[in-house]
Amino acid sequence: MPIPNNHKGKYFFHFTHLENLDSIIKHGLLSTNKKNQSGITHIDIATKGIQERRSTMDVSCGPKGKVHDYVPFYFTSINPMLLSVVNSKNKDQQFFIFLAVSIDHIDNADTVFTDASANTDPPPNFYDSPNDLDKLDWNIIDKRAWKYSYEERHKKMAEVLIHEKVPIEKIEYIIVWNDSIKKAVLTVFKQNNTKPPEISIATFKNKFYFYFTKFFLGRKNKSLITGPCFLKLHCFNIIKEIQEKREKEQSGNYLFSNIDDALQKINSNFCILKELNDIYKLQTSNEAHKDCVSDHTLKVVEELKSGTDYPNFEDKDKKILELSAYLHDIGKGPKTKWEGGIQKAYPDHPADAIPMLERILVEDFETISDYEIRKICLLVTYHDLVADIIEKKRDIQQIVDVADNEKELDMLIALNIADVSAINSTWKSKVETELPAFKSKVLKEISNKK
């Protein structure tokens, strides 16, 4: 049965990690059950509870079977599932690629589609006739907004399900983040002696948009969230750059002679530092924060210094921790960043702080050691990591990758706990309950990497 005229020219999309592409070229896109039977593993972004529902959900038409007998695609290009993955801070968005297939494929006997995501309870409706395409909510599917009600979110993620396997030859287009990823994709095809489909960068046919960026800040080519690979790269590159610039540059007009001097002056005048002045009385619409950014910062400093583990640190590390506490949220500024001067919830503020740290540590300090530079950059960049791992399922490997020893781990924990304490005491209690097991596991992994 032909595709109705009002749906001709549409596509559906499957997104996957770049590292899975080699396997996809060799074996095709396989259903979960087929991959399991063949012993093929991919970088997986699936949520365990959702996958359990999909594994038992019956497909009521077409080849029937279970949802896991099918390769999933989505009609929407702006996928709430990808947004959830990006916000988890566990994967770098830049490495995700989209595989596009024409809607004409729906007329094949191996293909069914749904009017909502195939993980709901009760299940969505399943269809195998192109005439039923009008039963989907296309206004929501095609909408470019990011936020939806629960029901709208699932309608937006209406799926196309192709039974068992989609050979690479059936993929008509691949959409990638940028030219660098395009080159990487072409390299994988060349290594497999396979002709690639047409590759499009960022958008597709001038109307499909795929990636979540900081367009609202005028940075449309920057990922909404800096994932773990790029965050680590930026952090450690900036440490090296600060150290190298300090060897070459001597301005002779420093704001602070050293960290001691900086703490004395900041304690007397919060706004003495440009980046602190930029967050002074910065209001926030973030529901997790009741205080303006500067008031929250002062509470974090207070919580840090009154923490039970704070007396155990050496004096030099206490000073590094205190300065890092002052600097931990500078990435939320400046006020001019935000419409109306009110900061929205912004999980990527640690990444935005990195270039600010370069300016501060190069231009404002007459004397600062490489040891101090590394610790400050590490603490500010990862001040949210411990609590995110314990409470939000951020990958524990991220802290193993950046903390070199128990001291650095303890310093990261101290600043994280102070930040959490200044936000919510209940949240602090939850995190502290998990800390012993967390620390033991991380230290074991750190010792294994040496």
Image (cartoon, rainbow, N blue to C red):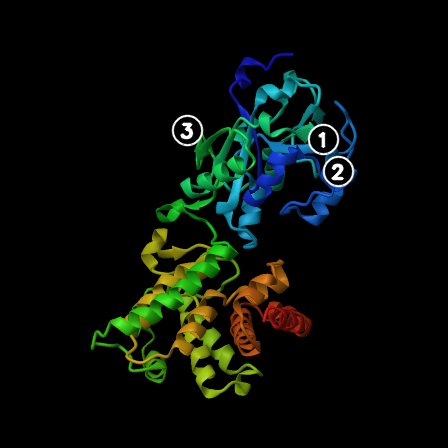
Residue 160 image point, x, y percent: 64, 28
Q: Quadrant of the N terminus?
A: top right
Determine whether label 1 and label 2 are within 8 Å by CB.
yes
Q: Which residue is mark 1?
A: 164
Question: Which class describes the residues within 10 Å of circle 3: few (<14), some (14-19), or many (20+)?
Answer: few
* Residue 325 visible in image: no
Is residue 334 placed above or below 434 in the rendered structure? above
Tally of numbered discs: 3
Which of the pair 83/216 is nearer the observer?
83
Which of the pair 11/232 is nearer the observer?
232
- Numbered label attached to residue 206: 3
* Residue 388 visible in image: yes
Q: How far apart are the two marked residues, 1 and 3, measured between alpha carbons?
A: 31 Å
The amino acid pointed to by label 3 is Asn
Which residue is pictured at 48% across the width and 52% down the height?
225
Question: Which class describes the residues within 10 Å of circle 1: few (<14), some (14-19), or many (20+)?
Answer: many
Q: Which residue is mark 2?
A: 33
Mark in front: 3 vs 2: 2
